[in-house]
Amino acid sequence: MSAADIELAGEARVFALAEVFTPSMRSVPQMLTRQAEHHGARTMVTVGEKSLSFAETRSLAASAGKALREAGVKPGDTVAIMCGNRMEFIQTFLGCAWCGAIAVPINTASRGAQLEHILRNCGARLAVIETVFMGVFAAAVEAGVPLQAVWMIGEAGEGHAFPLPSGPIPAMAGEMEAHPSKPSDTLAILYTSGTTGLSKGVCCPHAQYFWWGLHTAALLGIDEEDVLLTCLPLFHTNALNTFFQALLTGASIVVEQKFSASRFSARLAETGATVTYLLGAMVPILLSKERSEADSRHRTRITLAPGVPSQFHAPFSERFGINIIDGYGSTETNFVIGDQFLAQRPGKMGRVRPGFQIAIVDAEDNEVPAARRASLWFAPPSPSRWQPAISVRRKRRSRPGETSGSIRATGR
């Protein structure tokens, strides 16, 4: 088989998972249960020194869901999460999914009015936070946000009096049956960066992350032998998407605390990573470092690195032996534009992915030629077929089922 044929076969293998996970099975509890039965003791996720198998990950979700339910969290309630890349983040996120609650991951840089807005807007009564953030949350409580209790991750030092009932995150004991969430039910509310005003809460259904995992794994050619290494924050779509790539394909995910340019190559080798995840600005940072023999002493073959300037693709691949996949996706949509590596053109995002259509429109939403600057709208091709699986309920200007961006179209 040619390299192109191998890529196409890998994509087809991943898309075949849509037949394994039929539409009714695209909620997180259903995905966790199926993969726990299928992959059992194989390692699924590693964060720091802690690793969990597929079976243990499902059990953690069931235990965390029970703890949340016993604390009074009901289906449809929101739970705020503010912590770094720790296993407790995954525990709380999956626990919410298991008991029918809605996780609200918050950017750890949020402070003051931004944090207060998010907490008021989502209406969370319980927050799960690292103790390092107790001060900023105390200030938000004093400002009148609707929180009623806080679970702490880590040890609280002296002088950390909190104006609400607070205590350590409960020990996990026992399990509960999964709440019968539908794939269209909201799994999480992710808040955008707020570059044009206060952050907007994007209501993301369970099935949206099925499709995130499927589309991204198909472009990267992921299978159950892969090890996925991410240093990106779990409160962001990119790292959450990586978790679902591993869950769906049977791969293993390793979550780093943060990006380290000096340790990049060494960590690839130490973790046995075959796939990694970067942001556009990270690639020139890595290229600016002094060359090392470690740069190519790993088995990583590919990275998802959206937004890398075209002049850095070839030097990065030559130095590190890692191919770059670019593309376009957003919290509000999915991985809607992208190509596999052999079809990539540096500086271009690629082609529209299967299951989506685009329209290039002017300020009055009239379609215009691709050769001019305008807004790019995305939509599922058939609401009767795709809307339950991919739609995102949004708090923004949009047509039903559509989202907009300001991307220059090139006609490809």
Image (cartoon, rainbow, N blue to C red):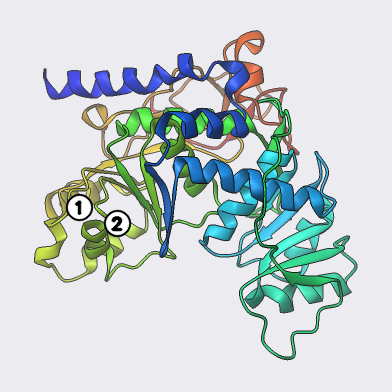
Provide the residue designation for mark 1: 316
Out of 261 and 62, give the one closest to the viewer: 62
Under mark 2, the amino acid is Val
Out of 404 and 236, give the one closest to the viewer: 236
Under mark 1, the amino acid is Phe
Quadrant of the drawing holding the C terminus: top left
Residue at the spot x=70%, y=53% of the render?
Answer: 199
Q: Which mark is residue 395?
A: none
SS type, badge 1: helix
Locate residue 289, reporting x and y percent: 21, 69
**Relative to residue 317, is residue 81 drawn left or right?**
right
Residue at the spot x=72%, y=56% of the render?
Answer: 80
**Relative to 3, does residue 39 appear above or below in the rendering?**
below
**Relative to 21, does residue 374 appear above or below in the rendering?**
below
**Relative to residue 404, is residue 247 drawn left or right?**
left
Q: Are marks 2 and 1 in contact (CB under 8 Å)?
A: yes
Provide the residue designation for mark 2: 283
Asked which quadrant contains residue 170, the reply is bottom right
Residue at the spot x=77%, y=66% of the render?
Answer: 150
Q: Residues within 10 Å of mark 2 (few under 14, many from 20)?
A: many
Q: Residue furthest front?
A: 174
- Of marks 2 and 1, which one's residue comes earlier in the chain? 2
**Relative to residue 405, is residue 285 drawn left or right?**
left
Locate residue 105, reporting x and y percent: 65, 54
* Residue 60 seen from this side: yes
**Relative to 106, does residue 140 appear above or below in the rendering?**
below
Quadrant of the drawing holding the N terminus: top left
